[in-house]
Amino acid sequence: MPAMQQPAQRFVDSADGIRIAVYEEGNRDGPTVVLVHGWPDSHVLWDGVVPLLADRFRVIRYDNRGVGASAAPKPASAYTMARFADDFAAVIDACSPDRPVHALAHDWGSVGVWEYLRRPDARDRVASFTSLSGPASTTSSTTSSAVCAARTTREPSSERSARHCG
């Protein structure tokens, strides 16, 4: 696998003004897939997955609020599932305003996307959602699950399924 280039970084403001660090890479003309990490990771969790998707997809990943280069608000009330859903909404609205996205999320990232999917307008914004659950005892086991999901996403016409990704 070739060495990864540094992804382009930009910032998106969430509904409450929190700045979210967003990283973009991959095929700019391809469908958009948004990778959402869990706690206590950052966008770096997906480093092993991006190369598997980048030829076919425009890959967006971001640091959840309070992590990495994103702003870290002080009050605990800034870390509700509704706020994580707001962050996801802000990212997809900024990065893919005219087309639905595919979401691949792990752990608390999944919970935030699930919260977003409860919203009435979510149906038109998310084409597919893959949730990688835990518990994962290590980041490497989480990454292995994500790599399996990426391979399945990358080869949608294949006979591959989760039981074949061991």
Image (cartoon, rainbow, N blue to C red):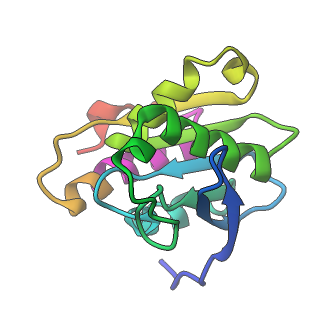
Q: Looking at the image, which residue is at 47% across and 77% down?
A: 1
Image-based side of 66 in relation to 145, left or right: right
Q: Looking at the image, which residue is at 76% across and 22% down?
A: 124
Q: Is residue 73 magenta?
A: no
Front-lying residue, 12 or 166: 12
Residue 154 seen from this side: yes
Q: How many marks?
A: 0
Q: Main secondary structure of the magenta part?
A: helix
Residue 127 percent coordinates (x, y): 67, 28
Q: Looking at the image, which residue is at 39% across and 59% down?
A: 74
Image-based side of 117 in relation to 31, left or right: left
State the residue lying farthest toward the left. Answer: 137
State the residue lying farthest toward the front. Answer: 75
Q: Does residue 28 lie above or below 79 as drawn?
A: below
Q: Quadrant of residue 20?
A: bottom right
Residue 156 percent coordinates (x, y): 58, 35
Residue 65 percent coordinates (x, y): 47, 56
Residue 155 seen from this side: no
Residue 2 percent coordinates (x, y): 52, 82
Front-lying residue, 111 or 147: 111
Which quadrant is the C terminus positioned in? Answer: top left
Q: Is residue 146 magenta?
A: yes
Q: Looking at the image, which residue is at 34% across and 41% down?
A: 108
Q: Does residue 104 lie above or below 11 as drawn?
A: above
Magenta region: 144-158
Front-lying residue, 97 or 104: 97
